[in-house]
Image (spheres, grey):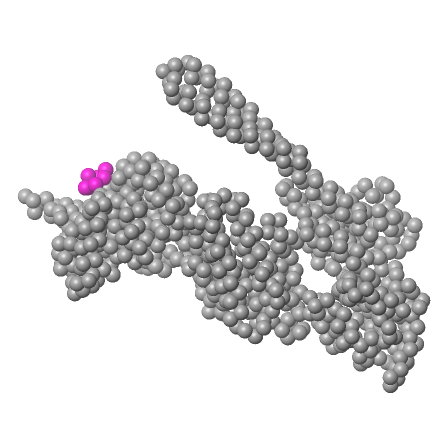
Amino acid sequence: MKQRIRAHLVNSVMVLFAVLTVTVIAYAFRNREKGELIYLIFNAYALIAVLLSFLIILFRQRAAKRRQLSKKKRLQNLTKDLASPAMLWDDTLRTVILNDTLRNLAELDPEHAADPKHVLSVLFGRETVSEQDIPEIIREKNREFCFVTASGQERDMIWTTSAVETEENGVTWYLSIGLDLADIRLMQSELATYSKRLIVSEGRHNLTMELMDVGILLIEQGNRNLFPSDKLRQMLGLKDDVLTVEELRSRVYPADLVTFDSRCRNMHDHMQDYLRKTDSVELRLSGADGQYRWYSYRFRATQNPETGRLAVGGIVIDISGEKAKDVQIERIAYEDSVTGIPNRQKLLQMGHDLYRCTTEMENSYWVIVIDIDRFHMINDACGYAAGNELLRQFAEAMNRQLEHGGFGARISGDNFALILRNTGDPALPEKVVREIQQSLSARSAGGLANISLTCSAGYALMPADGESFEDVMEHAEFALSSNRSMLGGISRYTEAMHDAIVKENQLEVRLSEALANHEFVLYYQPKISLETDAVIGLEALIRWRMSPDKIVSPEAFVSVAEKSSLITQITRFVLDEACRQAKVWQDEGLPEVVMSINFSGADFYQDTICEQIQEVLRKYRLDPHCLEIELTESLALKDIDLTIERMNQLRAAGIQIAMDDFGTGYSSLSYMQMLPFTMVKMDRSFVRHLEEDRVVQEIVFSVARIARSKKIKTIAEGVETPEQARLLKAAGCDYAQGFLYGKPMTAEETEAYMRERARYRKGYRG
């Protein structure tokens, strides 16, 4: 409650600060003649602004620290409440907190208990413990650690360690829960005695296991009957002295059947392995009251000296209470804070277990990776609160697909994953994703009403599509990335896809090296006025000079660059070099022309793109009207509101804008009405059929007429014959570009071309 009041107070101060800012600026504007007074007012305002900013920063830092301390205190309380030996420690090895159970068990003296590294080295049975040992400690789930208490008593422990919290400063906290093996050691010493008393005959099995007040279960090799102790029969509500595997299986919680079947098969086929190691399994079983409870079965094998057969025996403990505590701890470690569903760490843990089961049980699972398309634009347009609400709704839609079994998690910002049992239907992943897409499209309401909500997916089959769960996940992500350019796409992983992505990755590395080594150059293609035959502009086209005799066109690498941040670096190079060259030609006295460059979506939708362009123009002292930005129609229509906002910013700065590939989209003419273009470039597909197709001629005439009424210039691409140029001029088209007038040329060739063109026109006029 106090935190909410403080947050409300900070928000109120920020609102007051904004109102004060507007008031001061308005007053200064109205009284701008009173220079000295205005100077004093601004000084006072600046002092207030600095003070308020300092207070707000201080408040937020303290609030963040309070939240961190609150979370840390909650973890400490959970640790202390655990009945099992437990300790909370951090990866800097400067703090370790023992609960009472562990403190009493370890009998650490006060002097040594104050040294965290000493405590951890003793309890983990190591000479020393360093930060490099932490990954190994986490992996060692079943390793037995031995240490000696202050009274000289040996203690054997098994530790389970998990990361439960990472602070803002990067410090990670770990919770280690121990199992004292003293009772189990006693059980093992009795196991040999029990094995000798086990008499196998045709239909008669007698066993007395009343020495311990714990559940004990014995399993003999080649025998379908299991032998529970009296205590275990009480715990599970069993009436008979023997129990079959099928009867025990009927008591297993459905979600734990995969684990149960896997262990039974492994025990049947590899029982001799348990002569050398102790293992454990945790399952939910139906108890005497009919309710499912958590039980831990820790077991080991021995050989019956009378029969020569192997027998597995172990202790069964009700761990439901500890599991309830684990749920709270797991929620901190494995639950996504925004959606409430499992996070990536839990997905990896579950995926590893299931992958092992698929190899042992000969079954399979679909792994599906889903991405909400253009989620960053939703955050930008509607705010993070709306974005988080959409994530929660998406998680709900995804969880509805788990009614028949499976697992779902949020693995990163707008990325989710599903694991579904393969039912034999190869179309199952697509059906599931389609249902999620339908549910997502229905969310286009409220602040999201003007945004088309879609999601894309890639999927792979486990274990067929990878040698580990990480492999299968990576391949599903390969499939997702293969359809990045198509909203709502769904793709299954194939080996050919993997090879293509590997090649793309290699090309991406090579592109990065090419940028660093200055291997990119610009070629220029002229734009000609159909009325005057003058060069009115140049289009700057990127080329990759891989070697002196090998020039690569953009079609071979731009699509790869667009999938990474490299396209932004390439566009910056084109913008800078094109403006520099335009200014050089102006200074050399060549006719002033408009330099055109192409922009990708990643470039155009940047918040500061207008400022970046203006900075380059100022750098080379180039007039803004000498620069033209070309946008494809499909790019412009991705987010119509944001497109108009960006275009208006560029137009206000004096920069011209052309719609490239006009006519290849969906509603070209209607968007000509809405978008503030200065030029429309008719796609070469119209020009190609202009001479023989009357319908194409009518379209070109109509486009030119409508553009002229909107005071928009028109240019046709791909002009190759004089007849095409004549028809375009007759239709009212302003400019032309194509091989008829010149192919893309180097800067030197372009300069010579422009000088020759200027001399020709001068001589023609003379």
| Quadrant in which the C terminus is drawn | top left
Does the magenta-highlighted stretch encompass residue 588? yes
User: Would residue 225 appear left or right of 635 to someone viewing this image?
Assistant: right
Foreground pick, 360 / 765: 360
Name the residue at 87% across, 48% down.
104
Q: Which percent across, then down, holds residue 121?
A: 79, 50
Q: Which residues are magenta?
A: 586-592
Q: Residue at x 80, y 59 (%)?
A: 319
Image x and y of residue 609, in percent? 38, 42
Residue 507 appears in the figure: no
Image position of 27 with respect to 510: above or below: above
Vertical side of 627 occupied by 694: above or below? below
Q: Main secondary structure of the magenta part?
A: loop
Residue 75 within the segment the image draws in magenta: no
The quarter of the picture where residue 212 lies is bottom right
**Residue at the image point whose x is 48% and y is 19% from the top:** 43
Q: Measured along the vertical axis of the image, is residue 449 above or below residue 306?
A: above
In the image, taking residue 634 as reference, residue 724 lies left or right, namely left
Where does the image place residue 237, in percent across and percent down from the top left? 84, 68
